Image (cartoon, helix red, strand yellow):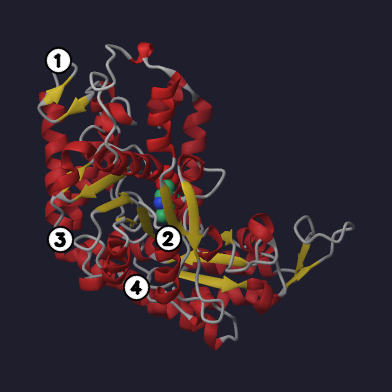
Amino acid sequence: LEVIATAEPTVAEAIRKELADQRGSLKLIASENYATLPTLLAMGTWFSDKYAEGTVGHRFYAGCANVDTIEATAARHAEELFGAQHAYVQPHSGIDANLVAYWTILSHRIELPALEELGVKSANDLSEQDWETLRHRLGDQRLMGMSLDAGGHLTHGFRPNISGKMFHQRSYGTDPATGFIDYDAVRAQVREFKPLILVAGYSAYPRRVNFATMREIADEVGATLMVDMAHFAGLVAGKVFTGDENPVGNAQVVTTTTHKSLRGPRGGMVLVDDEFAADVDRGCPMVLGGPLANMMSAKAVALAQAKTPDFQAYARAIASNAKALAEGFLRRGATLVTGGTDNHIVLVDVATSFGLTGRQAESALLDAGIVTNRNSIPGDPNGAWYTSGIRLGTPALTSRGFDADAFDRVADLICETLNATTAATASNGKPGKAKYEMAEGLTSRVHDEAHEL
Ligand code: PLP
């Protein structure tokens, strides 16, 4: 930090404060974690200074031998860890991984006529009619993913995201009565819509998914099944999700981030069946520019760590701690979406449980040193900004060694804080801007206890 401060003291100070914030609060954001020291150290090296467009052994720049070593090592670890046929470790983030995956599937499945077939030498010579043919072949493709309010991610076809603009899209939801995926309903929708790509995976669904059934559904209409396991990759790596619940082996294309339950550096990856290998390896230049070699080296380190028995124990603890957290809420009378969890996520319906919007609950908890994020619940009457829920995840605090008893105490602190929070009504009748009032002294007591935990 002293070295950084000589160049820019504000940044050094912000880094110091961030460490204090992250260590001094209860981090329950389901997509966050604490990377290990070897992973953190690998991110900040001179690999950051190297350009290496292309893929292993096939670069558009000289001097890439060391980048080849780290990229091949990361890919080998990913393939061995997940049992994947081929891994592409260049994507800079989850959103990049999904874009690479979509274009991989499109490139593989949509045959565009070569320029020679169209009788021209350059794209500059294509007629309006030729452009219309090309546009139509690429632009009329169909994608179906889980809706945002049921727990899907915005890259799964949400209108404001590029995935909702690239594809003609529709979404499937969850059973309104139970909150669970209704596979018969998904099958009926898929039969009717006939997507080219069926996306499974989620950001805020607190249950396991049967990917073997999703593959059967996709196969019925010749769709490619793509699973985005960004959130639960750690549970797959740690062998908590196996067989029908393992996306690898059931889906042809699997994408992930590396920084959530997998506990690696920020970044993404795509795992594919061999038939897609050549196409995914064109991720750069298809979608990406030069890969971040420092981040790929950190991915290799984290993936090597994820292959250990210690990581498997960690993954099991993520899931058992989530159960303890959910049971802690249920015992104290709170309402949970789907009535519980069997992954790493607990989605609390704070409107029903505490008469608050997600936004009010989120800010009351933050004041008490408990960091969460507000989240829509299925059919949310408060919309995506105010919301009616908060999403909690166990990966980060499990990295800090919290056990079931500690998570029960976390549920207690959250319930105590939210029970003492009163939502005032805003003058325009809307919920969000309303100030909440908490019982005198509670904030600092919860803060202190959270700190002790
Ligand atoms: N896919 C899923 C399921 C996610 O939950 C997220 C992030 O929250 C992403 C993709 C995007 O990841 P990133 O933020 O690294 O682009």
Q: Are marks 4 and 3 in contact (CB under 8 Å)?
A: no
Residue 62 disc label: 1
Residue tagged 2: 202
Q: In the rendered structure, which disc, 2 or 4, sits on the residue that comes first in sequence?
A: 2
Residue 68, percent from left and from top: 12, 30
Residue shown at 41% from the left, 63% from the top: 190
In three-dimensional space, the C-alpha distance between marks 1 and 2, rounded to whole angstroms, equals 40 Å
Check the image and report above or below for 93 versus 382.
above
Residue 433, percent from left and from top: 78, 55
Dot 3: within a 10 Å radius of its alpha carbon, few (fewer than 14), some, or many (20 or more) residues? some
Q: Are marks 1 and 2 in contact (CB under 8 Å)?
A: no
In three-dimensional space, the C-alpha distance between marks 3 and 2, rounded to whole angstroms, equals 26 Å
Amino acid marked by disc 1: Ala
Q: Secondary structure at mark 1?
A: loop
- Closest to the camera, between mark 1 and mark 3, is 1
Q: Are marks 4 and 1 in contact (CB under 8 Å)?
A: no
Amino acid marked by disc 4: Ala
Q: Are marks 2 and 4 in contact (CB under 8 Å)?
A: no
Residue tagged 4: 319
In three-dimensional space, the C-alpha distance between marks 1 and 3, rounded to whole angstroms, equals 35 Å
Q: Secondary structure at mark 3?
A: loop
Q: In the rendered structure, which disc, 3 or 2, sits on the residue that comes first in sequence?
A: 2
Q: Is mark 2 within 8 Å of ligand 1?
A: yes
Residue tagged 3: 308
- Closest to the camera, between mark 4 and mark 1, is 1
**Left or right side of 431 for 242:** left
Q: Secondary structure at mark 4?
A: helix
Q: Are marks 3 and 2 in contact (CB under 8 Å)?
A: no
Q: Secondary structure at mark 2?
A: loop
Residue 30, percent from left and from top: 45, 60
Amino acid marked by disc 2: Tyr
Amino acid marked by disc 3: Thr
